[in-house]
Amino acid sequence: MITKELIARINELSRKQRSVGLNDEEKQEQKNLREIYLEGIRGQMRQMLDNIEIVDGPVEAPVNKMAQNPKITHINEVAINLRPYLH
């Protein structure tokens, strides 16, 4: 799970790496924390993709170019918001 503490520690190690460098133990910690972060992002993306509903068929659209084509595929809404996962 992605937490504020996880991101803060990743950022802290990143700043230290740029300024004075990291020892082997800190490099390993940084690698592990980044992997935890990436797994969290992958999990969020999987969850979002699982919740997408694709409606395949004609859609009543307002009078415009889209209304001239009855074979339009419409996706109701796709929104990405990562804030709820940053506890």
Image (spheres, rainbow, N blue to C red):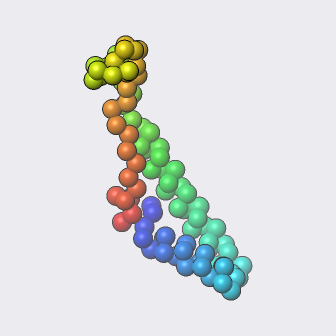
Say which residue appears at 66% left-offset and 72% top-offset: 28
Residue 72, x across and y down, in percent? 40, 19
Residue 83, x across and y down, in percent? 37, 59
Q: Quadrant of residue 86?
A: bottom left
In the picture provided, is 18 more to the left or to the right than 74? Answer: right
Any part of residue 56 in sight: no
Q: Residue furthest right?
A: 24
Establish if 83 lies above or below 4.
above
Say which residue appears at 49% left-offset and 56% top-offset: 40
Q: Residue furthest front?
A: 64
Q: Quadrant of residue 11?
A: bottom right
Any part of residue 74 in sight: yes
In the picture provided, is 34 more to the left or to the right than 76? Answer: right
Say which residue appears at 66% left-offset and 79% top-offset: 18
Residue 71, x across and y down, in percent? 41, 14
**Image quarter (top left, top right, bottom left or bottom right) of the N terminus:** bottom left
